[in-house]
Image (tube, rainbow, N blue to C red):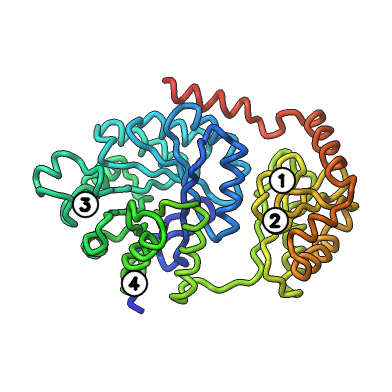
Amino acid sequence: MAHREGTRQIHVGRVPVGGGAPVSVQSMTTTKTADVDGTLAQVYALAGAGADIVRITCNDVAAAEGLAEIVPRSPVPIIADIHYQYRLALAALEAGVQGLRLNPGNIRKPHQIRAVARDAKDRGIPIRVGVNAGSLDRDLMKRYGSATPEALVASAQKEIEYLAEEDFHDIKISVKHSHVPSMVESYRLLADTVGFPLHLGVTEAGPPPGGLIKSVAGIATLLLEGIGDTIRFSLTADPVEEARAGRQLLEYLDLRERTGLDLIACPSCGRAEVDVLEVAQAAQAKLEEAKLPIQVAVMGCVVNGPGEAREADLGIAAGRGRGHLFIKGKVVRVVPEDEMVEALLDEARKLVDEGVEARIAAADDLAADLAAQDRQVLIDIQGDANRAAARRAAVADVAAR
């Protein structure tokens, strides 16, 4: 496999991109961002399917306020997708996102781009210059006649120049096209032109199986040439399919290690009732030793945990000195806190042997009621533990300036 030398490395939260780091998988939520719980549930599902980074639209003030609650509760770094309104980029930064995606085709005023660059630089947040053949700047379309590879790369270079004027260099770039040969040639040209990490994707690939075939044709071709640092399959489908396909492609190309157990955990927050890292590490060690091929979630509190991680095969959430075991979001057992890891292992073995439906049918009669009681008590005690109201207000203030 070819190797592209000299790629600059950036960090999207804790995920390194470029500079020899493992190729990462991205996807994008399809929920309304203002629906915080629904969006978080999809983020957890994407993380469980193999997404290292998740992009979320920030198309209005309500979405920016939603990000203020979503970001601190997300298991993976969040990138805000920005179109047209640069103030929403500033609001998303205030919300705490770990990355921005700007489209040069619809945020064109240099002073607006520079304002975003200054704020992002102050916060240490990277920006993706997301060029798209379907929304290319009118002047470039006039100059090149169509969305040629040269036009897409010129658009990226123009945006890079604006960012460089603010001494901003934490950049990754995409030049997406729906026509696979044009997409491949655009990225080849871009790789010969810049040293920034590249985000690969075939835009508007469509539904499977055609969308999958187009995406694999374009992305795999470039990866085998050593081009590309992070990828996204843009499918007209459940985004979980995008994440799963991206992860599988990297495994098939020997660019990511194959894994059996898929353990996800919340990043911990003001509601966490246990040391999430400690429990997650203990659970991972036990489950990996047992070689159980399932997806398991370790969540810090029962208030949000079962709902946010409802796509996991099995999970456990803490609350009031107890562990609440859940299968596909349904609480099936409540155990003492010091028995959480062993109970998780025991239930995981039964789940693999008996299946989801059988284990849900075997749920303790009082488990769901106990979980509901613990959840309400914690809400009454902790109130707005994650300062969601204050974070929303700060974001709304930035967006309204």
Task: Spot the residue most to the bottom.
Answer: 1
**For residue 250, above or below residue 312:** below
Q: Amino acid at mark 2?
A: Ala
Whole-number angstrom distance, CA of label 2 to CA of label 4: 34 Å
**Disc 3 residue type?**
Leu
Residue topped by disc 3: 152
Query: Relative to the observer, which residue lies in front, 230 or 47?
Result: 47
Q: Which residue is mark 2?
A: 297
Residues at badges 3 and 2 in contact (C-beta under 8 Å)?
no
* Label 1, residues with CA under 10 Å away: few <14, some 14-19, many ≥20: many
**Mark closer to the chain start, 3 or 4:** 3
The label nearer to you, 3 versus 1, is 1
Q: Are marks 1 and 2 in contact (CB under 8 Å)?
A: yes
Pointer 4 residue: 226
Instruction: Give the Cα separation between the discs numbered 4 and 1.
Output: 39 Å
Q: Residue at x 42, y 55 (%)?
A: 10
Q: Mark 2: few, some, or many residues within 10 Å (few <14, many ≥20)?
A: many
Counting from the top left corner in percent of width and height, residue 56 is at: 47, 42
**According to the image, label 1 marks what residue?**
305
Question: Along the polypeptide, which appears first: circle 1 or circle 2?
Answer: 2
Quadrant showing the N terminus: bottom left
Which residue appears at 63% of the width and 43% of the height? Answer: 73
Q: Is the residue marked by circle 4 packed among few (<14), some (14-19), or many (20+) residues within 10 Å?
A: some
4 vs 1, front mark: 1
